[in-house]
Amino acid sequence: MRWRSPAVLRLQLWLLAVSASLAALGVLAADLSKEPFTIRISCGSFDDVRTEPTNTLWYRDFGYTGGRFANATRPSFIVPPLKTLRYFPLSDGPENCYNINNVPNGHYQVRLFFALLDNPNLDSEPIFDVSVEGTLFSSLLLGWSSDDEKTFAEALVFVQDSSLSVCFHSTGHGDPSILSIEVLQIDDDAYNFGPPREKGTVLRAVKRLKCGSGKPAFDEDLNGIHWGGDRFWLGLQTLSSSSDDQSISSENVIAETLLAPNFYPQGIYQSAIVGTDRQPSLSFEMDVTPNKNYSVWLHFAEIDNGVTAEEQRVFDVLINGDTAFKDIDIIRMTGERFTALVLNKTVAVSGITLKIILQPVKGTRAIINAIEVFEIIPAEKKTLPQEVSALRTLKGSLGLPLRFGWNGDPCVPQQHPWSGVDCQFDSTKGNWIIDGLYVL
Ligand SMILES: *[C@@H]1O[C@H](CO)[C@@H](O)[C@H](O)[C@H]1NC(C)=O
Ligand SMILES: *[C@@H]1O[C@H](CO)[C@@H](O)[C@H](O)[C@H]1NC(C)=O
Ligand SMILES: *[C@@H]1O[C@H](CO)[C@@H](O)[C@H](O)[C@H]1NC(C)=O
């Protein structure tokens, strides 16, 4: 038996929607004279917490739709030293969220750190999916807790309705758990990978490497500023274990850093990896999810004392065999030594590897200072807000058991719709609508 949503209800709710969408017009531009809007939540905590070494403030837990609190075990040294987490047993439903309201419209770096339940009777490393604003952006994979880089997930997302939702979707492998949520405003134009400007995309940070230094660092450790978010840079001394790349570094001040829209700290340019006389090219390879688009950002500064003028180091950049940049001559392009150069390229990857080769064409061996890779994810369109609130009312009046969940958006992410709800995409409105409910 099916229940159709009555037309009257839909009309009433449509009127509501008109007023709501008028309010949502106009996205604020970043005002750099101000500090960016920032919220940090220590999940499962009853009190606000401050953490060393930067005296960072984490608010006590709020905005969650369910779950329990527990003591946390940090799986990695890069995870903030917080003591509690929130976890979502299946009995609380397969979908649970944090809904954070009063977030000024704009562009945000949303970062989640994961941790394990401090319980010796459980050896479980939960595996689950994470979405932001209805768009699935991260799937934890087996072994995540023993890989520093996989103990957090980061998405760049536009907030357009003054609220931000982050949802955790059970995949039937343990209880999703979350240590902390950071919502850090960044420039509206940050990581703009080229015209046309798309608010309809979410960027997932896949990799951030600081080359030539083995020490990992956050922007904060590198004297970055808050408008840069607080990026995590993994330190790397060689690009591949089979090559004998060399590390170089410099204490010199680097020009053209801390500039809009990405505000890179100079520390990422003060070290580099260079090729050798025997192997002058550099090659970097990483595993990726196939059939996705990636945005690749490459950072250079001429910090090598052996290179002092144009034409002394010229190289091409190939990504998966295609020439991404030709004849890169850092000094010619920046005009000076010790000056930052940032290049970005969008590439479609059909296979499971992304391979970057820096191939000298003139002069000495290749150089690279830092690499960033993002997955470009088309943002999901949400369900018509009035239909969502109608379903919420229904959830209350039916007294649905907690285990149904019904948190977040009913239709998206498409991989995790609410159970018992039939969704259909209305291409004229550009939203999902509820086509019906089936008996639960
Ligand atoms: C968490 O650990 C503290 C001691 O550090 C202990 O007093 C408390 O009972 C623990 N809480 C839970 C929920 O296990
Ligand atoms: C990224 O590359 C595009 C295309 O080449 C360019 O238009 C854009 O300005 C670059 N963005 C930044 C922030 O450098
Ligand atoms: C990748 O980008 C191309 C060109 O913009 C687009 O047609 C395609 O749908 C994108 N692929 C994915 C998986 O998003």
Image (tube, grey):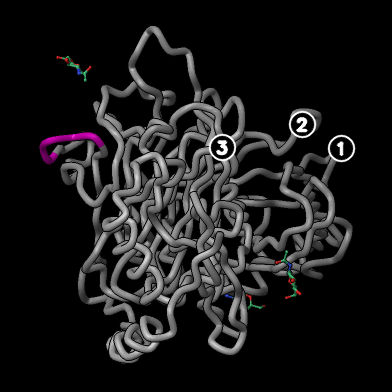
Q: Amino acid at mark 3?
A: Thr
Query: Bounds of the magenta span?
Result: 44-48
Element assignment for label 3? strand
**Image coords of residue 52 (percent x, y):** 21, 34
Please tell me whether the stretch drawn in magenta is mainly helix, strand or loop.
loop
Residue 166 vs residue 222, the one in the foreground: 166
- Label annotation for residue 278: 1
Q: Residue at x 45, y 66 (%)?
A: 157
Answer with the quadrant where ligand 1 appears in the image: top left
Is residue 25 toward the left or the right of residue 238 in the image? left
- Of labels 2 and 1, earlier in sequence is 2
**Image coords of residue 312 (percent x, y):** 75, 61
Q: Amino acid at mark 1?
A: Arg
- Assess whether mark 1 and mark 2 are in contact (beta carbons under 8 angstroms): yes
Q: Residue 262 magenta-drawn?
A: no
- Of labels 3 and 2, earlier in sequence is 3
Is residue 439 toward the left or the right of residue 36 in the image? right
- Of labels 3 and 1, earlier in sequence is 3
Near mark 2 (Cα within 10 A), the count class, few <14, some 14-19 or many ≥20, is: some
Is residue 387 toward the left or the right of residue 54 in the image? right
Is residue 24 toward the left or the right of residue 138 in the image? left
Element assignment for label 2? loop
State how far apart marks 3 and 2 are (Cα): 42 Å
Q: Which residue is mark 2?
A: 244
**Image coords of residue 84 (percent x, y):** 25, 29
Tell us which disc is closer to us: 3 or 1: 3
Q: Is residue 207 visible?
A: yes
**Image coords of residue 228 (percent x, y):** 38, 61
